[in-house]
């Protein structure tokens, strides 16, 4: 697969024009975007999805009104359930990995003694000085391992939490749509 993709990428990348961002504000925004953690990225995706996807479903003129309503309700429910569980599972997994990758300095600050558990996922051959130099890399290491663990956990929670929660929320939103549609409208002086 890589043998197929590599020549295509090698032809496309050189054709992309180089762009230097002169605005300090835009440069800062791009730098900040690169610092978002996996849970924060999930929240951003959820916010973007909730702002756009339900309107696309509700505006689909190829289906009848009832189908649009149910589709929109289901989309909203899936976004809420997926964002909620995705955020918290990622956050929990990264925090768990933090506990398993304590540097000597962090253990000193927490007044803990080194144990096998809090150093389970870091190389034991690194000295204190090497840990201090690799602090930025350690943060990325923790985030990457935590995100991978979260993806494994979410293989199960998609069926155990997301699907049932989506079903419940879909029913709630469909009921709300039906109630708002059946509500008598105020017709003062119009007839």
Image: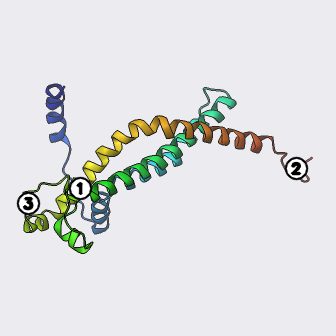
Is 13 placed left or right of 157 in the picture?
Answer: left
Where does label 3 land, which residue? 126
In the image, what residue occupies the spot 22% across and 62% down? 102
Q: CA distance from mark 3 to mark 1?
A: 16 Å
Say which element carries label 2. Answer: loop
Rendered view: 10 above or below 135: above
User: Mark 2 near mark 1, Cβ–Cβ under 8 Å?
Assistant: no
Q: Which residue has dot 2 on it?
A: 187
Residue 136 x/y as whole percent? 19, 62
User: In the image shown, does 85 or 56 lie closer to the viewer?
Assistant: 85
Please say if the residues under marks 3 and 1 sit with CB atoms less than 8 Å apart. Answer: no
Residue 68 x/y as whole percent: 63, 33
Q: Which mark is residue 117?
A: 1
Question: As drawn, is 130 to the left or to the right of 93?
Answer: left
Which numbered mark, 2 or 3, is in the foreground of this view? 3
Mark 2 or 1: in front is 1
Residue 89: give its label.
Answer: none
Name above or below for residue 160 compared with residue 186.
above
């Amino acid at each position: 697969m890589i043998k197929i993709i590599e020549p295509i990428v090698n032809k496309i990348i050189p054709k992309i024009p180089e762009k230097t961002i002169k605005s300090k504000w835009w440069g800062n925004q791009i730098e900040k975007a690169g610092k978002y953690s996996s849970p924060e990225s999930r929240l951003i995706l959820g916010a973007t999805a909730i702002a756009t996807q339900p309107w696309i479903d509700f505006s689909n003129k190829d289906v009848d009104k009832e189908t649009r309503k149910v589709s929109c309700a289901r989309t909203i429910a899936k976004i809420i359930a997926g964002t909620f569980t995705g955020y918290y599972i990622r956050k929990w997994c990264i925090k768990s990995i933090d506990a398993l990758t304590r540097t000597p300095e962090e253990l000193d600050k927490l007044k803990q003694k080194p144990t096998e558990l809090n150093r389970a996922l870091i190389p034991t051959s690194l000295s204190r000085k090497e840990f201090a130099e690799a602090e930025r890399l350690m943060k990325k290491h923790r985030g990457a391992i935590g995100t991978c663990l979260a993806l494994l956990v979410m293989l199960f929670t998609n069926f155990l939490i997301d699907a049932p929660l989506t079903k419940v929320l879909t029913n709630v939103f469909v009921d709300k749509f039906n109630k708002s549609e059946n509500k008598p409208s105020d017709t003062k002086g119009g007839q």
